[in-house]
Image (cartoon, rainbow, N blue to C red):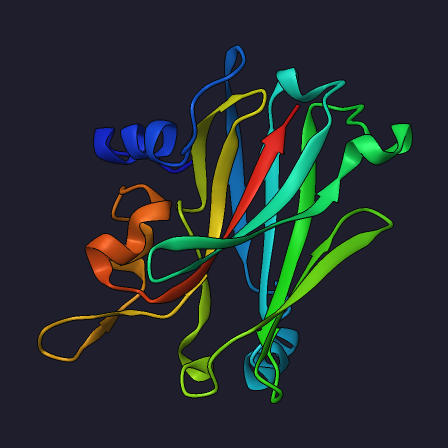
Amino acid sequence: MIKFSLSILVYSLLALNCVAQTGPLVTATVTLEAGAKDRDLQTILYFEGISYEKLLVNSPALVGKNYQIIINEFVKGSLTKTDVVFDSSEDEYFKLKADKLGFAVVSKVTEGNEFKISFQFDGFSAGRKYRVDAHQKDKFTLKSFFYKEAPISLAAGTKTYLLAFMTPYVRADKSEAYCEVAHSGIDPEHLYERYQIPHYFLVAIQFN
């Protein structure tokens, strides 16, 4: 089990939840597994420019809840698009019947300058496509806002940001950084103000 410093704990509990609380606050654990376990498969994914992440959200409070997967697109600091990629309330079948929710996130940028992302659940999937600038497409990457395992706070009707698909922060010396941004602890909706990242996508989950 990984031990977390106080700063990481505070970040996990506060910074990821980026809208006003609208329901009772509960604590959940999010576990991230980046890449494929099979070494040969991971080599192929890397060659093809495919990102593969597996996430598991665990809390007794999840039983009986509906959930949404939401993508927010930001351009120069302004929210330009919100997509509800999946909404479990569309059918009673999808309502959570256990204390955990697991899914995989697969993404890549195509030769046609499209960001493709797919959320793979047990027996079904949902995805979206977005246009990205041809001159920036090789700079985009998928980053998580936490380490391998972290506590997060959840409240009904509150978006919790899990991932960002973004270009890097370019420092004064022209070096580039991704993790510095993702683990900075600032509100993900304000990445442009702090890091001047012109175009990025935020992946959120919301329980209802």
Q: Residue visible at 63% across and 82% down? A: 44
Q: In front here: 77 or 10?
A: 77
In the displayed structure, does residue 84 sit left or right of residue 140?
right
Residue 192 image offset from top left, x and y in percent: 28, 57
In the picture shown, does residue 90 fall above or below 198?
A: above
Number of marks in the rendered image: 0
Q: Is residue 37 left or right of residue 139?
A: right
* In the displayed structure image, the side of residue 166 where residue 193 appears, left or right: left
> In the rendering, at what x and y percent does residue 50 appear?
59, 74
Q: Residue at x 30, y 34 (%)?
A: 11
Res 15 → quadrant: top left
16 is higher (above) or lower (below) than 158: below
Q: Position of residue 32 (x, y in %)?
A: 52, 47
Quadrant in the picture for residue 111:
bottom right
Q: Position of residue 137 (x, y in %)?
A: 47, 81
Q: Nearer the viewer, residue 176 or 46?
A: 176
With respect to residue 193, does 131 lie above or below? below
